[in-house]
Each structure stands twice: as C-alpha cells, then as structure tokens.
Image: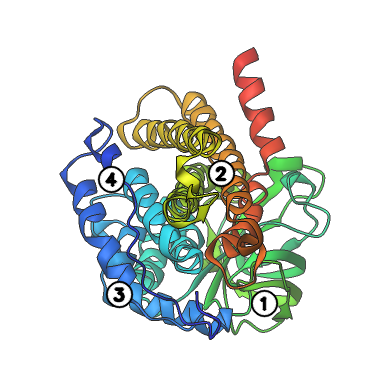
Amino acid sequence: MSSSGILQATTLRPDTAHLALPFFDAAHRRIADTLPDWTNDQRVDEADDRAACRDWVRRLAEGGWLRYCVAAAHGGALPALDSRALVLLRETLAFYSPLADFAFAMQGLGSGAISLVGTPAQQAAYLPAVAQGSKIAAFALSEPDAGSDVAAMKTEAVCDRHERAGASKDPEIEGWHLNGSKTWISNGGLADFYCVFARTEPGAGSRGISAFIVDKHALGLDDSAAIQVMAPHPLATLRFTDCALPAHALLGETGGGFKLAMQTLDIFRASVAGAALGMARRALAEAVQHARQRRMFGQTLADFQLTQAKLGEMAALVDAGALLTYRAAWMRDTGQGDQKARSVAAAMAKMTATENAQRVIDMALQMHGGLGVMVGSKVESLYRDIRALRIYEGATEVQQLIIGKGVLG
C-alpha cells in the first residue's frame, strides 16, 4: 500500500510448493496458478475501506472469483461450496490485500446459511446475485453481550399469526417482528442483505434461536452506526426496532438457527486460517527480501546466523499452520471423519494458523527495525491486519475449548 492508499504491485509471489500435496486437485491448482497475477494487477484505492470493499466486490465478480462463494446450481464455479478452494482463494488474496480477502470472504460467509438451508426461492433470489457481485452479503450473529456465548443473544423475533380456516385451526405465520441489536457486523451499513440470528423461543437456550434474511431497506432496521477499528474494514452495529419481516424471511427451521450458525462457521473457519496463512507468507517474503538487501557491518542481514535461525522458525510456523489448514479443508470437502472430528480439525487450523501468523508477522516487523513500525510499510499494515483474525469467527480461546472437548470425548 502506498501513502496515497492505492494498492501497489509487488514482485513477491506466494509460495506454491504446497500445491503438490495430495490435499489438492486440478481445480484447486488452477486457482493458485491464475489468481496471484490477477490480484497483483488490481489498482484499488483502499484509503476509504467502504468504497474499496465495493470496488473489490465488483472486481472479484468480474474476474469470476465470487463464483466460488456459491454452488454451480446458482452460478457458482464448482458443484458445491469447496473449503479447499475457499482456503486457497483467501490465502492468495490476503497475501496481496487483506481488504480484498475480506470482501471475498464476506460474500461467502454472509450467504453461506442460504446455501445450506435456503428454500429454492431464497437461493434463487440471493445466491446468483452474490456470485455476480450485485448484492453484498453479511452475517449478523454477535451482540453487545453475546459474542463467544452465542446462546446468550437477546435479539428477539416475534411471529404474527392468524387462524386458518378448516378443522385444524392451526395458526399460520403471517410475518415476524425483530427487536434488538447486533454488533461487530462485517459489511454492516454496506450489505444489501443480512443473515440475522434471533431468539424465537425465550428460555430455550440455543434451541430457541432462528435465522432470518433481512434486506437492507427493511422497515425498522438501522445499520448506520459504523465502528472504527485498528485495521480498517466495514463494521457496524445493527439496530432492529419493530423491524417487520415477511413469513418467508425465515431461513431454515424455527429453532434451528444455532445449529445453522455453527454449520456456516464450520465451513468458513478453515478459510480464516487460509487468510492468516496469506498474511504470514507475505510477512515471511518481506522479511527474506529485506534480509537479502539490508547491509550492516559489511554484510547483508541474511548473512547473520541469527537472521537465518529466525527465518527458519518463521517458515516452520507457516508450514505448521498450513498443514493443519489444508487437512481441515480436505476433511470437510471429502467427508473424512464425523462432524465432530471435522469441527475439531477446523478449530485446530484456525487457532494454529492465526496464532502462528501473529508470531511470524511480529518477527518480520522486528527484523525490519524502525522501518517495520513506519505507517505505510507492508509489515506495519500486516501487524494491524492479523490481530482481528485471532478473535473473529471464534476467538482462539473458543477454539481451544472445542479442541479440548474433542480430546476428552
């Protein structure tokens, strides 16, 4: 990134040796062959994160990359949502621009629940538009007092009913009214629709949560409260005040929202690890380039054994996260193990890749010395970008609990 905010081209390229691993097939290797040059050719002004995200969504759609966010039946590139493709896409995009990665990821996460359980009408209304970039998606789960503890959410959806004619007299749902708030919502204020999770049965814990599709212009929705964070990207608080929804806004079964949220996060959790890998690989590449060029005491920084040892540690940390990430995505795509085993594998990948990336980027910044903390340098921006990945879509501590419970059986 230059001081003007325009994404700059680089001669650095992500390592592709891992593509020879048996986790990947020809479709995945095509992504890794063509995406780096495409991304490196883009000149997006990222000074305004919201404008930049709109620009990235448009470009990603025109390049055909958003087609990996939906299945082929809805205009997608592959027969089904493919975790390995998502991992490779996010890893490559994040190597060049974490904001490009963000724009891509939210199209997938924001529409993932519709891909999983949407009715044919819901899928037809939203998924092709996601692939074409004509609708921007968002996933609205977290609340001010319900982040990691999803079951503590307070946003409530109350149904309107009327009595049906006939012997049964069973009430029929006419619509819903949402009240409450969501926060830390990526693409908040930017999205054209939100997949919102709300309580439909008080006192029922996680079994009392349902999911809804809420269009941006729904009466009673206010998504204007933007949140500023250390690595700028669109975030906002959503407020629902007697927000009226039609009956067909319900996504999946009543009471099935918690399970749906967890299933959606499970699909994309490994891709968060992929984004962390991309940032870590870029930091390592920057460190190697700097070490080869920086001269001190009559030799290059790379000539010092201490530098060589540090680069070796960084490379091992990247590969450790990568292998867990690729394994988790492969297990999900091929159905290896049961659901619990796949969830544990995804948690291991997300925890290890994000924590290791933080360490790698910190070491790269340290190796750059004063240049590393200069605003506008690549390692400085990576240092800010990586921090949130250890928190969102399940903080490291939550991943540790998932893994620990899996170990205990």
The circle drawn on residue 349 is none
Picture quadrant of residue 354: top right
Q: Disc 2 or 1, which lies upstream in sequence? A: 1
CA separation in Å, label 1 and label 3: 44 Å
Task: Using the numbered discs, state the Cα–Cα distance from disc 3 to disc 4 in whole angstroms.
Answer: 19 Å
Whether tag 3 and tag 2 are in contact, CB under 8 A, the answer is no
Question: Mark 4 near mark 2, Cβ–Cβ under 8 Å?
Answer: no
Crowding near the residue tagged with mark 2, few <14, some 14–19, many ≥20 C-alpha atoms within 10 Å: many
> Within 10 Å of the Cα at label 3, are there few (<14), some (14-19), or many (20+) other Cα atoms?
few
Which type of secondary structure does the marked residue at label 3 adopt? helix
Residue bearing mark 4: 16
Q: Give the alpha-carbon distance from disc 4 to disc 2, as whole Å.
A: 18 Å
C-alpha span from label 4 to label 1: 49 Å
Q: Which mark is residue 360?
A: 2
Q: Residue furthest toward the top?
A: 408
Q: Is residue 170 visible?
A: no
- Residue occupying the far left of the picture: 26
* Cβ–Cβ under 8 Å for marks 1 and 3: no
Residue 244: mark in rendering: 1
Q: Amino acid at mark 4?
A: Thr
Residue visible at 70% across and 76% down? Answer: 243
